[in-house]
Image (spheres, helix red, strand yellow):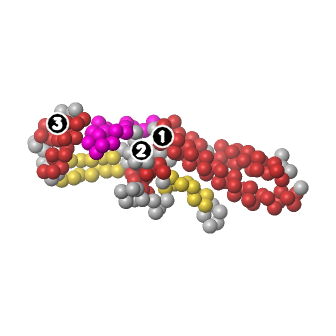
Amino acid sequence: MLPALAKAFPGVLKKAALQEAHFIRGKIVEGIASQAPGGKPFKPLSPLTLAARRLAGFRGTKALIRTGDLRNSIVVVVGKDGSVAIGVSRNAKGEDGQDLVKVAEIMEFGAGPYVIQLTPKMVAWIAKLYEEAGIERAPSARGGGKGYIVVKIPARPFMRPVFEKWGKPTDVRARLQARIAKLLKPYGGR
Protein backbone atom coordinates (compact mmCIF):
# COMPACT_ATOMS: atom_id res chain seq x y z
CA MET A 1 0.00 0.00 0.00
CA LEU A 2 2.85 2.43 0.84
CA PRO A 3 4.41 2.39 -2.64
CA ALA A 4 0.97 3.13 -4.17
CA LEU A 5 0.39 5.98 -1.71
CA ALA A 6 3.87 7.42 -2.33
CA LYS A 7 3.36 7.29 -6.10
CA ALA A 8 -0.11 8.88 -5.91
CA PHE A 9 0.73 11.58 -3.37
CA PRO A 10 2.24 14.30 -5.65
CA GLY A 11 -0.75 14.19 -8.00
CA VAL A 12 -3.18 14.11 -5.07
CA LEU A 13 -1.47 17.13 -3.52
CA LYS A 14 -1.75 19.11 -6.78
CA LYS A 15 -5.39 18.15 -7.18
CA ALA A 16 -6.22 19.11 -3.58
CA ALA A 17 -4.53 22.51 -4.01
CA LEU A 18 -6.45 23.09 -7.25
CA GLN A 19 -9.74 22.14 -5.56
CA GLU A 20 -9.00 24.60 -2.75
CA ALA A 21 -8.21 27.37 -5.24
CA HIS A 22 -11.49 26.74 -7.09
CA PHE A 23 -13.32 26.78 -3.75
CA ILE A 24 -11.90 30.26 -2.98
CA ARG A 25 -12.58 31.47 -6.53
CA GLY A 26 -16.17 30.28 -6.15
CA LYS A 27 -16.51 32.27 -2.92
CA ILE A 28 -15.23 35.41 -4.69
CA VAL A 29 -17.72 35.00 -7.56
CA GLU A 30 -20.50 34.16 -5.07
CA GLY A 31 -19.62 37.30 -3.08
CA ILE A 32 -19.96 39.52 -6.15
CA ALA A 33 -23.32 37.92 -7.02
CA SER A 34 -24.63 38.31 -3.45
CA GLN A 35 -23.10 41.80 -3.15
CA ALA A 36 -21.46 40.78 0.14
CA PRO A 37 -18.09 39.04 -0.36
CA GLY A 38 -17.03 37.29 2.81
CA GLY A 39 -20.23 38.58 4.40
CA LYS A 40 -19.20 42.25 4.00
CA PRO A 41 -21.82 44.15 1.95
CA PHE A 42 -20.72 46.47 -0.84
CA LYS A 43 -21.38 50.16 -0.49
CA PRO A 44 -24.52 50.78 -2.62
CA LEU A 45 -24.12 52.44 -6.00
CA SER A 46 -24.75 56.18 -5.98
CA PRO A 47 -27.98 57.54 -7.45
CA LEU A 48 -25.89 59.20 -10.18
CA THR A 49 -24.24 55.90 -11.13
CA LEU A 50 -27.65 54.25 -11.32
CA ALA A 51 -28.93 57.16 -13.44
CA ALA A 52 -25.95 56.81 -15.79
CA ARG A 53 -26.68 53.11 -16.14
CA ARG A 54 -30.34 53.77 -16.95
CA LEU A 55 -29.42 56.40 -19.55
CA ALA A 56 -27.05 53.86 -21.13
CA GLY A 57 -29.88 51.30 -21.30
CA PHE A 58 -28.73 49.12 -18.42
CA ARG A 59 -31.24 48.42 -15.66
CA GLY A 60 -29.06 46.50 -13.20
CA THR A 61 -28.37 47.91 -9.75
CA LYS A 62 -25.62 45.60 -8.52
CA ALA A 63 -22.06 46.81 -8.02
CA LEU A 64 -19.33 45.17 -10.12
CA ILE A 65 -21.84 43.42 -12.41
CA ARG A 66 -22.65 45.86 -15.19
CA THR A 67 -21.38 43.52 -17.91
CA GLY A 68 -20.09 40.53 -15.93
CA ASP A 69 -16.60 40.95 -17.43
CA LEU A 70 -14.88 41.45 -14.07
CA ARG A 71 -16.66 38.55 -12.36
CA ASN A 72 -15.97 36.27 -15.33
CA SER A 73 -12.28 37.23 -15.43
CA ILE A 74 -11.52 35.76 -11.99
CA VAL A 75 -9.48 32.64 -12.66
CA VAL A 76 -7.37 29.95 -11.07
CA VAL A 77 -3.91 29.68 -12.59
CA VAL A 78 -1.39 26.89 -12.04
CA GLY A 79 2.22 28.03 -12.35
CA LYS A 80 5.03 26.07 -13.98
CA ASP A 81 6.32 25.30 -10.48
CA GLY A 82 2.94 23.87 -9.45
CA SER A 83 1.92 26.94 -7.45
CA VAL A 84 -1.72 27.94 -7.60
CA ALA A 85 -2.98 31.54 -7.82
CA ILE A 86 -6.44 33.10 -7.83
CA GLY A 87 -7.15 36.47 -9.37
CA VAL A 88 -7.68 38.42 -12.55
CA SER A 89 -5.33 37.51 -15.38
CA ARG A 90 -2.96 40.30 -16.44
CA ASN A 91 -4.15 39.82 -20.01
CA ALA A 92 -7.89 39.94 -19.24
CA LYS A 93 -9.81 42.53 -21.25
CA GLY A 94 -13.45 43.53 -21.03
CA GLU A 95 -15.72 43.44 -24.05
CA ASP A 96 -15.01 47.17 -24.39
CA GLY A 97 -11.24 46.54 -24.35
CA GLN A 98 -10.72 47.74 -20.77
CA ASP A 99 -7.81 46.29 -18.82
CA LEU A 100 -9.65 44.21 -16.20
CA VAL A 101 -6.67 44.04 -13.84
CA LYS A 102 -6.89 47.84 -13.55
CA VAL A 103 -10.67 47.66 -13.07
CA ALA A 104 -10.20 45.02 -10.35
CA GLU A 105 -7.59 47.17 -8.61
CA ILE A 106 -9.90 50.21 -8.65
CA MET A 107 -12.82 48.18 -7.32
CA GLU A 108 -10.73 46.52 -4.62
CA PHE A 109 -9.02 49.68 -3.33
CA GLY A 110 -11.01 52.63 -4.72
CA ALA A 111 -9.52 55.48 -6.72
CA GLY A 112 -9.28 59.23 -6.71
CA PRO A 113 -10.09 61.87 -5.95
CA TYR A 114 -9.73 63.07 -9.53
CA VAL A 115 -10.24 66.72 -10.39
CA ILE A 116 -11.72 66.99 -13.86
CA GLN A 117 -12.15 70.23 -15.78
CA LEU A 118 -15.63 70.29 -17.25
CA THR A 119 -16.44 70.89 -20.89
CA PRO A 120 -19.86 72.24 -21.94
CA LYS A 121 -20.76 68.72 -23.15
CA MET A 122 -19.88 67.29 -19.70
CA VAL A 123 -21.98 69.95 -17.95
CA ALA A 124 -24.98 68.99 -20.12
CA TRP A 125 -24.42 65.29 -19.34
CA ILE A 126 -24.16 65.96 -15.59
CA ALA A 127 -27.37 68.01 -15.71
CA LYS A 128 -29.07 65.08 -17.46
CA LEU A 129 -27.74 62.67 -14.81
CA TYR A 130 -29.07 64.82 -11.97
CA GLU A 131 -32.46 65.05 -13.71
CA GLU A 132 -32.58 61.26 -14.29
CA ALA A 133 -31.61 60.63 -10.66
CA GLY A 134 -34.25 63.06 -9.42
CA ILE A 135 -31.65 65.10 -7.53
CA GLU A 136 -31.81 68.85 -7.31
CA ARG A 137 -28.41 70.14 -8.30
CA ALA A 138 -26.28 72.05 -5.82
CA PRO A 139 -25.77 75.78 -6.54
CA SER A 140 -22.16 75.17 -7.63
CA ALA A 141 -23.42 72.67 -10.21
CA ARG A 142 -25.69 75.37 -11.70
CA GLY A 143 -22.80 77.44 -12.92
CA GLY A 144 -21.61 78.99 -9.67
CA GLY A 145 -18.55 76.72 -9.57
CA LYS A 146 -15.21 77.05 -11.32
CA GLY A 147 -15.87 74.48 -14.05
CA TYR A 148 -14.38 71.48 -12.24
CA ILE A 149 -15.77 68.34 -10.69
CA VAL A 150 -14.15 66.01 -8.17
CA VAL A 151 -14.72 62.29 -8.67
CA LYS A 152 -13.85 59.58 -6.16
CA ILE A 153 -14.51 55.90 -6.77
CA PRO A 154 -15.19 54.12 -3.45
CA ALA A 155 -13.52 50.82 -2.68
CA ARG A 156 -15.72 47.78 -3.07
CA PRO A 157 -13.36 44.99 -2.00
CA PHE A 158 -14.38 41.67 -3.52
CA MET A 159 -11.25 39.59 -2.89
CA ARG A 160 -9.84 40.67 0.49
CA PRO A 161 -13.04 39.92 2.46
CA VAL A 162 -13.17 36.42 0.96
CA PHE A 163 -9.54 35.73 1.88
CA GLU A 164 -10.12 37.18 5.35
CA LYS A 165 -13.04 34.80 5.89
CA TRP A 166 -12.00 31.68 3.95
CA GLY A 167 -8.22 32.03 3.61
CA LYS A 168 -7.09 31.70 7.22
CA PRO A 169 -4.08 29.34 7.19
CA THR A 170 -5.56 27.00 9.81
CA ASP A 171 -8.82 26.70 7.84
CA VAL A 172 -7.03 26.21 4.51
CA ARG A 173 -4.79 23.56 6.10
CA ALA A 174 -7.82 21.71 7.51
CA ARG A 175 -9.64 21.77 4.15
CA LEU A 176 -6.49 20.62 2.32
CA GLN A 177 -5.96 17.75 4.77
CA ALA A 178 -9.58 16.65 4.33
CA ARG A 179 -9.26 16.86 0.52
CA ILE A 180 -5.99 14.90 0.53
CA ALA A 181 -7.46 12.20 2.79
CA LYS A 182 -10.49 11.85 0.51
CA LEU A 183 -8.34 11.71 -2.64
CA LEU A 184 -6.01 9.08 -1.11
CA LYS A 185 -8.84 6.66 -0.16
CA PRO A 186 -8.75 4.77 -3.46
CA TYR A 187 -5.04 4.11 -2.86
CA GLY A 188 -5.60 2.60 0.56
CA GLY A 189 -5.48 5.83 2.58
CA ARG A 190 -7.90 6.38 5.44
* 114 vs 139: above or below: below
Residue 160 located left or right of residue 124: right
Question: Which residue is rendered at x = 48% and y = 51% of the image?
Answer: 72
Furthest residue toward bottom: 80
Can residue 129 be seen from the camera position used here?
A: yes
- Residue contact at pointers 2 and 1, CB within 8 angstroms: yes
Density class for disc 2 (Cα within 10 Å; few <14, some 14-19, many ≥20) is: some
Could you give the CA–CA distance between mark 3 and mark 2, rounded to whole angstroms? Answer: 30 Å
Which badge, 3 or 2, is on the more N-terminal residue?
A: 2
Element assignment for label 1: helix
| Residues under numbered marks 3 and 1 in contact, where contact means CB atoms less than 8 Å apart | no
Q: CA distance from mark 2 to mark 1?
A: 8 Å
* Res. 96 mark: none
Foreground label between 3 and 2: 2
Which residue lies under the disc numbered 1? 33
- In the drawing, what numbered circle is on residue 138? 3
Residue 38 in the image: x percent, y percent?
Answer: 53, 39
Label 2 belongs to which residue?
A: 65
Residue flagged by tag 3: what amino acid is it? Answer: Ala
Can residue 155 be seen in this snapshot? no
Q: Is residue 54 magenta?
A: yes
Depth check, front residue: 157 or 100: 100
Q: Start and end of the magenta stretch?
A: 41-61
**Disc 3 residue crowd, few under 14, some 14–19, many 20+, Cα 10 Å:** few
Q: Amino acid at mark 1?
A: Ala
Q: Position of residue 145 (x, y in %)?
A: 13, 44
For marks 2 and 1, the one nearer the N-term is 1
In percent of width and height, residue 104 lies at: 43, 52
Quadrant for residue 102, please give it. Answer: bottom left
* Mark 3 and mark 1: Cα distance apart in space: 34 Å
Where disc 3 sits, the SS reads loop
Three-letter residue code for mark 2: Ile
